[in-house]
Structures are given as structure tokens and as C-alpha cells.
Amino acid sequence: MSEAIFIGVDVGGTSLRAARFIGHNPTPDAKIKVATQPAGDARQMLDRLEHVIREVTPPNLAGVEGIGLGIPGPVNPYTGVVIKITNIPGWENLPLRQILEERLARPVFIGNDANLAALGEWKFGAGRGHADVLYLTVSTGIGGGVVAGNRLLLGAHGLAAEVGPILIQPNGPRCGCGQRGCLEALASGPAIARDAAERLSRGEGADSALRALTNGDFSKLTTALIGHAAQQGDAFARSLFREAGEHLGYGLASLLHLYNPSIVILGGGVSFIGELFFESVRATVRRYAMHERYWRDVPIVPAALGDDAGLVGAGALAMEESRALVVPDR
Ligand SMILES: [Zn+2]
């Protein structure tokens, strides 16, 4: 008997990626990436989605046991309904699982992309061998996922582990969610760039290389540019990441109290900055945890799956859920 085939799909804001996995193997044997092009109506996007899935599957989906999809927004993983994706027109209360199962005649599973990245890191990445994993992704936004007792924590409506809106600083900077001082408004990539622009405008960082690198136009500041300056030793740029790490550390201390993981994994563009950021996060956690049991022997490490986390996570969802279909969980 040939090995089961699983399909993982990462529906990103800018690119749509699909991969084929043979058995429980994290290395895809076929991959495709196309622009998401979120124009048009809900149907056009569904057609494009079906197309990328068929591109990586054998004719008639022979041997495919499950298809997992990571969605960049709130979903109900129990019903397979996408609640809302701001960037994709018409994807609101969309019964995605039902639609794709009708089109493809195979089991379809959906999950929030950060949740699935957590699942991928637990099954194949930095969290292998850990039953209790906390994963945070720090990039344009801040997302998270929790694996507790070797199960992805979903919550009553599948909305658990939404870490971005954790309140860090009342009356802090305005957040995309409408509140102020959320973790996402203080430690995400755009938050760091905005903070840099405000401070440079006020005259801080007088000798920072960022002034020359942007020709004084601080709207050009990006996390990548600030990260580059930080790695070159720019004191002002370094202080920005140290502070963002501190803010993340405040949130993380609370999350350690709540979930008591045995490992914390940080992914996303901001964490690629490296040790400067991680050291600040670790030091803050040590300062604010109520007991050292929460952080001693709990490594805080970079994600291992990098760019592929979403794709591998979606594949892992298909593998895990397909198994659950065959062997009832007891
Ligand atoms: Zn917020």
C-alpha cells in the first residue's frame, strides 16, 4: 500500500502556498506559491485556492487523506467556517470546509495560521518531544498557539490563544483592533517602526544611522531596516528592539503563568533579529514571573520551521485530524 498523502495550504495576505506531504514527513515533495491577489469576489478566491490544491495533488486526488488550511484570521475549526478575513473580499462567515469538501471530495480541516504554526513546531520543529508548547509569532501582527498535553488548545469557539490583544499598557499607542496599548501595538514590526519614527522626530537617536538610511523620511522606516542598523551596532536601533522585547516579556510572563509550557518558541520576522531581542524577552520574564518554576528549564527559543511554519503546520493539521478520523480519540 502506498503512503498517505496530505496537503497543506497557507492562505497568506500576499501569497497563497500549497504543499504535498507523503506520510508524516515534514519535507514537502511538491510545493507551489502564487500571489493571493485578494481582488474580486469570494468565488474567485475559492477558484484560485482549488487550483493551487489541485496543482500539488495527483490526478483525481488519488491517495489524498486530508487537506489542511491555515487562515490568517479568526476561524471556527469545529465547523470549518471562516469568521472574517479583512484582506479577502467576501470571506466573512464563509463555510470554507463545506465548500472545499464538495469541490474536492476529501476531508478538509481549517485552523488559524498562528495556531497551526504552533502545531507544526510541536510536531516537526523546535517543540518536538514537548507535550506543552507555547508559540508566539511576532511580525506584522502578533499571534500565538498553545499545545497543552499534546493537543492544540482551541477553546469553546476555536478562538483560544489570541495573544495580540493582551493589554500591556493602558492608554498606550492605538492598536489596529481599536484598543490602546495591546501587546501587538507595542511589540509587532509596525509598532517598532512607528515608535522609531516618533522618537527620531522628537530628536532622540541624534547620531543614529537610521537618519541617513531614510534620508530623514521616517515613513520609510521598516523593521528590516531598523534590524539591519541594530546588527551594525546602532545604539538607538538596539534600544528599540530591547524595548519591544521587554513588552513581549510582560505578555509572556502572564502566558507562562496561564499555560505553564515546557518550551516557548518565538517565530515571525521580528524574532529573526536574534539574541538582542531574545535576551530582553528572557530578562523581562525572569523579572516578572511570580516564581522561578515558571521559567527555569523553560527554554525560549527561535522557531525552527522559519518561513515554512504555516505550510508545515497546515500539513500537520491534516495529518493529525485524519488520524483522529480513523482512530476515535479516547
Ligand atoms: Zn489590539
Image (cartoon, rainbow, N blue to C red):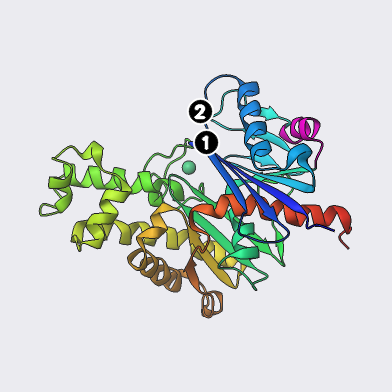
Quick check: can you spot residue 272? yes
Viewer-nearest residue: 277 or 24:
24
* Region rendered in magenta: 96-106
Q: Which residue is mark 2?
A: 37
Which SS type dominates the magenta stretch? helix
The secondary structure type at the circle numbered 1 is strand
Q: The residue under label 2 is which amino acid type?
A: Gln
* Rendered image quadrant of residue 324: bottom right
What residue is rendered at 52% in x and 75% in y?
Answer: 295
Magenta includes 104?
A: yes
Quick check: can you spot residue 154? no
Total tally of numbered discs in the picture: 2
What residue is rendered at 22% in x and 56% in y?
Answer: 229
What residue is rendered at 53% in x and 77% in y?
Answer: 291
Q: Which mark is residue 153?
A: none
Viewer-nearest residue: 196 or 79:
79
Q: Which mark is residue 34?
A: 1
What residue is rendered at 61% in x and 49% in y?
Answer: 30
